[in-house]
Image (cartoon, helix red, strand yellow):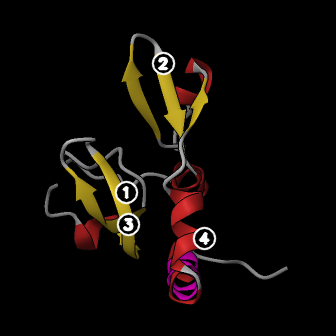
Amino acid sequence: METRTADDVIEIMNEILAIDASAVNALLLKRVPCNGTLAEHETVQVRDEGEGKFSLSLLGILNGLFGNIGGDGEKKDWGTIMVISDWDDEKDEATGIQKFMRTEEGWTGK
């Protein structure tokens, strides 16, 4: 069995994005409701929607596989993999993935 690193997955996800961005966006930008127990998972990334409701995306699951970036900074609990995307300020959500990368290499703010 071949072992894959977060960097391997990032490379593959960028290849898939280049082949069919519409499919990747439809899959990765979709969020589904999840329960509070999953929200408390040590590494899976979920969004707190407020009022005890949470949602999950495939990116949150991928990050669950590779864990948090750790350290002492504000991003210590963030997942290893992030997407660079277009952003809709009115909806406060991503609208189109441009690329995948390591979180510690790419976050500059919204």
Q: Are marks 1 and 4 in contact (CB under 8 Å)?
A: no
Identify the residue position indicated by label 2 in the image: 53
Identify the residue position indicated by label 4 in the image: 23
Q: Name which of mark 3 and mark 4 comes first in the sequence.
A: 4
Residue 96 disc label:
3
Q: Is residue 13 above or below residue 68?
A: below
Name the residue type under label 3: Gly
Q: Residue at x 27, y 41 (%)?
A: 91
Q: If the image is split into quadrants, where does the C terminus sit?
A: bottom left
The question of residue 12 being in magenta is answered with yes
Q: Which residues are magenta?
A: 9-16
Residue 106 disc label:
none
Q: Main secondary structure of the magenta part?
A: helix
Name the residue type under label 1: Ile
Q: If the image is split into quadrants, where does the N terminus sit?
A: bottom right
Identify the residue position indicated by label 1 in the image: 69
